[in-house]
Amino acid sequence: MKTKETLEFNIILERLADYALSEKAKEKLLLLEPSLNERDCKNRMQETTSASNILEAQGSPPLTAMPELDTILEMASKGSMLLPEQLMSVCSFVMACSQMKRYLKRAETVDVCIASYGDVFYSHESLLDEINRSIRNNKVDSGASTTLRGIRRKIENTNSAVKSKLESVLKSKKEWLEDGYIATRSGRFVLPVKTKYKSKVEGSVVDISKTGATSFIEPIAVRKLQEELALLEIEEDNEIRRILYTLTVLVDSHSHELKINMDYMERLDFIFAKAKLSKEMKAIPVVMTTERKIVIKQGRHPLLDEEVCIPLDFEIGDGISGVVITGPNTGGKTVSLKTVGLLSLMAQSGLHVPAKEGSVFSMNGSVLCDIGDGQSISENLSTFSSHITNIIDILKNVSDESLVLLDELGSGTDPAEGMGIAIAILAELRQRNCLFVATTHYPEVKNFTKNTEGLVNARMEFDLESLEPLYKLQIGEAGESCALYIAQRLGLPNNMLARAEQEAYNSTPAIGNARSRVFQAGDQEEHKRPARKIKKQITKPSTPPRSERFDIGDSVMVYPEKVLGIVCVQPNDQGELGVQIKGVKQRINHKRIKLMAHASTLYPEGYDFSIVFDTKENRKARHDMGRKFVPGLTIEYEEEI
């Protein structure tokens, strides 16, 4: 399951990796996984906290990227000669390690946890001194050895002698020369002689210009000096190679300690990257617990702009295993769902979380989610098929240590069937004893949640005055879709509103304007002001709720299945009627029921409805019991619906 991608944890890891300098630290950060061990998780969190404290007190640490250092050490171990620039890379790393030791030494007054890493770094002062003495500006310095210094002095003297002889020819034979300068060809000093005078200059023609007008001649007077110069250059190259090989062996002899320094530098790079991300997100360390509970105080989604992101207050656990969030579209339900999941993954990975003190996160064995419509043309998956495929996969992997996140539960199909599937899924998750958060629009699901132990409704608040979502989660109450209310506020004609309500709730409006059961969302305590405004336009009906206007024996149509049934039980507090359909009694929300014929028009006064609702065997047993005692005679009662 693509939980990381769905919750955008992979984007957090990419941002985290950007703060690292070394490639290995970047790779490890990109592969960061939530820990399944409580001690390990708390240690990771403490490391991030320690690094964050040091970062705040002393600024950024002297980390280094260590480019190709692994390759350099491997070359040295195989006997390959290291080049001056490679030796300088080693030198730069050794200097960075020394700076890191000093940085961590100063950090001991701030936090001992990370500062203790300073004690494990090797200094390598002798290696540093030898490389600095021998290499300058990525070249072997003359001070590397007395032999090299002597050879280079001879080369310099010989070069001066060659130039002196050539300059004397330049002065005495100017008419033979094309230009008054000494040239070089094939590494040798030559004179640019006009071709027509080349026979007058004793020496060897080394090169000819493209036009053929100039011949570059090495005079015989300097040939011997140039041959001597070539031999000196060979000696110089041999001495340079000897020095470089000596330094390579020296590096190889320190390779073990250098690798230890590299490991600790990468580890610190890894840890301080987490601290830098924490600073950027204004995040804090949070409590990790093996108890099955999550408490988020003023939590922010880290990928949303802090200036516009509404903080989330959320709580689950302590007897509550499931939270069902309802409310209008674009109200922030999905963002809340993702925030809970993403912050849980971050905390369990040892990262600080953008929240306030008092936040607590549970150690989850897995975080499983179904978020997004998941449509796929290539795989021929509809929205509903995708949801069900994901949920089946979730149910295969869920355990009592899982956190499950489900968005738009039961959507993408027939509303009645989708509602039934949604309730079945919630009931199954409750049986599995996992923590779960789901979003939905179904009123029946809200009722199921309200009447089921261990589950609680929550809603996203909505400003009925401005018609804008407030993106604030309120746990304990179910939300409304507010569709008819919003349509009315935006100016949808009253006759259309009335027809919409009639079709939605299978009822006849009490007045010319839409009676608006949903509009009663405006009567909620937190929306008193817009409610008063609506009362000026809409008069509430005096008729009782529809669920109270049905009688036993009424013939009704049940939607959306459009099947006929008979009312057999009066409504409960949730407005659910008992309806017998094809001999089966079940509870159905009054919103799905339309009266077809009243019982008074179908049955005579005082009619015995046990004929309709009871079995023939039970009716006979009651008749016999009324006449005499019959041993072993029983009446079977159906389970109360």
Image (cartoon, rainbow, N blue to C red):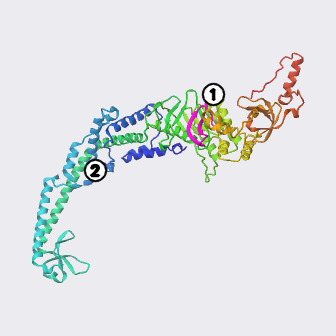
Residue type marked 1:
Glu
Residue 163 location in percent, x, y?
A: 12, 69
Q: Residues within 10 Å of mark 1 (few under 14, many from 20)?
A: few
Residue 268 appears left or right of 92: right
Q: Quadrant of residue 40?
A: top left
Task: For label 2, count other residues whose C-alpha is less than 10 Å away and answer few (under 14), some (14-19) or many (20+).
Answer: some
Q: Which residues are magenta?
A: 453-479
Mark 1 and mark 2 lie on one chain; the one further toward the N terminus is 2
State how far apart marks 1 and 2 are (Cα).
66 Å
Please say whether residue 396 is one of the residues in the magenta stretch.
Answer: no
Instruction: Kindly check if marks 1 and 2 are in contact, taking CB atoms under 8 A apart as contact.
Output: no
**Residue hosting label 2:** 89
Please indicate, yes or no, whether residue 250 appears anywhere in the rendered image: yes
Q: Nearer the viewer, residue 596 or 27?
A: 596
> Which of 525 and 395 lies nearest the eye of the viewer?
525
Q: Write down the quadrant of residue 512 in the picture.
A: top right
Q: Residue at x 74, y 38 (%)?
A: 592
Residue 431 horizontal/vertical position (percent):
62, 31
Q: Secondary structure at mark 2?
A: helix
Q: Is residue 600 left or right of residue 6?
A: right
Q: Which mark identifies residue 352?
A: none
Label for residue 453?
Answer: 1
Q: From the viewer's perspective, is residue 204 above or below residue 109?
A: below
Circle nearer the viewer, 1 or 2 = 1
Q: Quadrant of the N terminus?
A: top right
- Comparing 12 with 469, the one in front is 469
Label 2 sits on what residue type? Ser
Q: Secondary structure at mark 1?
A: loop
